[in-house]
C-alpha cells in the first residue's frame, strides 16, 4: 500500500471486488485485467505488508507431481508462467524478481506406496509431464548421499523447481496495479446479499462498495468470508513451520525432496529450506514458533534419510498457515452455484496455493469474464462436492 492510496479510494462501486490481495487474489486481478482490460477491479487486503499472509511464509515449491488431472494441468500452466514471470510481469521495462530455479522435484516412497507412485507417474506422463521413474539402483546412482533403507522407488520431475514467493506476489501485485487495479488496505466485515446475488462489501472503515462480483481469495481466512453469505467452507488454518538449516558435510546437488511422511526440503543459498508438517496440529490462527520442533521432529527425519544432515544446524524457524481443506485437501475453485452465482471462491489449496495461483487466477477470471472455463475444466474442484460432502482427493500425495 503506497502512502495516500487509501485516502484516494473514494469510489462506491466496481465490477469485481477481490477479498484478499496475496498471491492468489493478485493473480485473479492480473488475469481479469488481461482478459478484460476495461474491467473495474478492486482488491481489498487488510494488511499491505502481508506480514501474516501464507505467501510470504511459503517454501516456494512448484511441481507437477499430482494425481488429479486438474492439479497436473494447473501446474503445467503455472510453472512455465512462474519461470517466465520476470519478463511477463515486467512494468515499464523493469523486470520482476521471481528468482525461479529449475532444480527438479523428487518424490520417494516405501514398498507399500510403489503402486500409487507408479500410477501417478503414468497419469503425469499422460498429461505431458517429463516424469522419470527411479528404482533403488537409479536413486543410488543419482543421490549417493541418500540412505535408501525402506525406500523402494522415486519419481523425478526435472522441469519443476521453486521461486521466491514474495517475489511472485509483488510481481503480480505490481503488474495488476499497473494494469489499472485498485488495491485498498481495509478489511471486509460484511457482504450485502439477497437470495440470488452478492450486492456489496462492507469495510471496517465504514465504506460500502457495490459490486457485480465478489471473489473470496482470503486464504486461511476464507471460511469467515464465505460465512458472510451463508456458504459453509471446510477450510481451517493449519500451522506449519519452515526451517532454514545448514550442514558442514558435502552433499551432491539435490532437487526438492519430498516423502509421504510430509518431510520436504530444498536447497536454499548455502543451506536448505524445509520442514515436516504435522497434519494433526490443532487448527487455529497460531503463529507462535516451537523452537524445539526442528530438533525434535525434523532433524531426526533428515538425518535418517540423508546421514550428512546429522551435523546440520537450524539457523532460523518461522511459522505460517496452510489453508487446509478438511474435506479432501484440494482447493475450492468456482462460484456458490445455485445460490449466489456471482460469489466466487478460490481458496483451500492446503499448501499448494503459490504454485497454482497463476492457473487458479486465470480460471476465476475466465468464469467471470467468459462465463465458463476456457482452458482447464476445473468443475470437479468446484463447490458442488463440498455441498454434497463428496471428497475429490489426491492419491498418495500431500
Image (cartoon, rainbow, N blue to C red):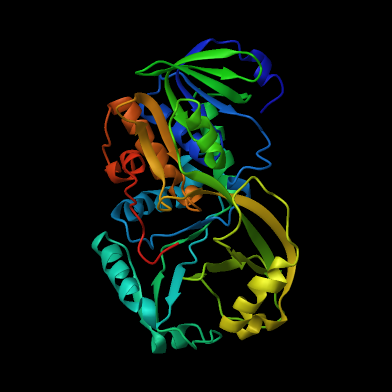
Measured as percent of width and height from the top left, residue 228 is found at 50, 26
The quarter of the picture where residue 49 lies is top right
Q: Is residue 95 visible?
A: no
Q: Is residue 148 visible?
A: yes
Q: Above or below — where is 2 with respect to 349?
A: above
Viewer-nearest residue: 198 or 154: 198
Viewed as shown, does residue 45 lie left or right of 343?
A: right
Q: Above or below — where is 181 with respect to 27?
A: above
Measured as percent of width and height from the top left, residue 50 is found at 65, 39
The quarter of the picture where residue 280 lies is bottom right
Viewer-nearest residue: 44 or 27: 44
Give the total number of marks visible in the rendering: 0
| Residue displayed at 56% across by 81% down | 305
Return the residue found at the far left. 126
| Residue displayed at 46% across by 52% down | 83
Q: Give the quadrant of the N terminus.
A: top right
Measured as percent of width and height from the top left, residue 67 is found at 33, 61
| Residue displayed at 65% across by 59% down | 241
Viewed as shown, does residue 272 lie left or right of 80?
A: right
Viewer-nearest residue: 362 or 285: 285
Viewer-nearest residue: 219 or 247: 219
Q: Above or below — where is 384 with respect to 58?
A: above
Viewed as shown, does residue 138 lie left or right of 192?
A: left
The quarter of the picture where residue 276 lies is bottom right
Measured as percent of width and height from the top left, residue 267 is found at 59, 68
Q: Give the quadrant of the C terminus.
A: bottom left
| Residue displayed at 72% across by 81% down | 311
Amino acid at each position: 500500500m503506497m502512502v495516500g492510496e487509501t485516502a484516494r479510494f473514494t469510489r462506491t462501486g466496481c465490477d469485481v471486488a477481490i477479498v484478499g490481495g496475496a498471491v492468489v487474489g493478485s493473480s485473479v486481478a492480473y488475469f481479469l485485467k488481461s482478459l478484460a482490460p476495461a474491467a473495474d477491479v478492486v482488491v481489498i487486503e487488510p494488511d499491505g505488508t502481508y506480514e501474516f499472509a501464507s505467501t510470504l511464509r511459503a517454501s516456494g515449491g512448484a511441481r507437477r507431481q499430482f494425481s488429479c488431472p486438474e492439479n497436473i494441468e494447473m501446474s503445467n500452466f503455472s510453472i512455465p508462467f512462474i519461470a517466465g514471470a520476470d519478463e511477463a510481469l515486467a512494468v515499464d521495462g523493469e523486470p520482476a524478481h521471481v528468482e525461479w530455479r529449475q532444480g527438479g522435484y523428487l518424490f520417494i516412497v516405501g514398498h507399500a506406496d510403489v503402486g500409487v507412485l507408479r500410477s501417478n507417474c503414468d497419469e503425469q506422463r499422460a498429461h505431458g509431464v517429463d516424469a522419470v521413474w527411479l528404482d533403488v539402483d537409479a536413486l543410488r546412482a543419482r543421490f549417493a548421499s541418500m540412505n535408501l533403507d525402506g525406500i523402494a522407488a522415486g519419481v523425478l520431475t526435472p522441469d519443476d523447481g521453486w521461486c521466491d514467493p514474495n517475489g511472485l506476489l509483488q510481481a503480480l501485485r505490481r503488474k495488476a496495479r499497473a494494469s489499472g487495479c485498485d488495491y485498498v488496505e481495509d478489511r471486509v466485515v460484511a457482504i450485502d446479499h439477497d437470495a440470488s446475488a452478492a450486492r456489496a462489501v462492507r469495510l471496517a472503515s465504514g465504506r460500502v462498495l457495490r459490486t457485480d462480483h465478489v471473489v473470496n481469495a482470503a486464504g486461511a481466512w476464507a471460511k469467515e468470508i464465505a460465512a458472510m453469505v451463508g456458504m459453509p467452507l471446510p477450510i481451517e488454518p493449519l500451522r506449519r513451520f519452515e526451517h532454514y538449516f545448514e550442514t558442514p558435510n558435502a552433499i551432491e546437488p539435490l532437487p526438492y525432496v519430498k516423502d509421504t511422511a510430509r518431510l520436504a526440503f530444498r536447497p536454499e543459498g548455502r543451506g536448505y529450506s524445509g520442514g515436516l508438517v504435522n497434519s494433526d496440529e490443532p487448527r487455529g490462527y497460531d503463529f507462535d514458533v516451537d523452537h524445539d520442533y526442528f530438533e525434535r521432529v525434523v532433524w531426526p527425519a533428515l538425518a535418517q534419510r540423508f546421514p550428512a544432515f546429522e551435523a546440520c544446524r537450524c539457523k532460523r524457524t518461522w511459522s505460517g498457515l496452510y489453508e487446509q481443506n478438511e474435506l479432501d485437501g484440494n482447493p475450492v475453485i468456482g462460484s456458490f452455484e445455485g445460490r449466489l452465482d456471482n460469489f466466487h471462491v478460490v481458496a483451500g489449496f492446503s499448501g499448494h496455493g503459490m504454485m497454482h495461483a497463476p492457473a487458479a487466477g486465470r480460471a476465476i477470471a475466465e468464469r467471470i469474464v467468459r462465463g465458463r472455463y476456457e482452458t482447464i475444466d476445473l468443475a470437479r474442484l468446484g463447490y458442488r462436492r463440498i455441498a454434497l460432502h463428496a471428497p475429490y482427493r489426491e492419491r498418495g500425495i500431500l
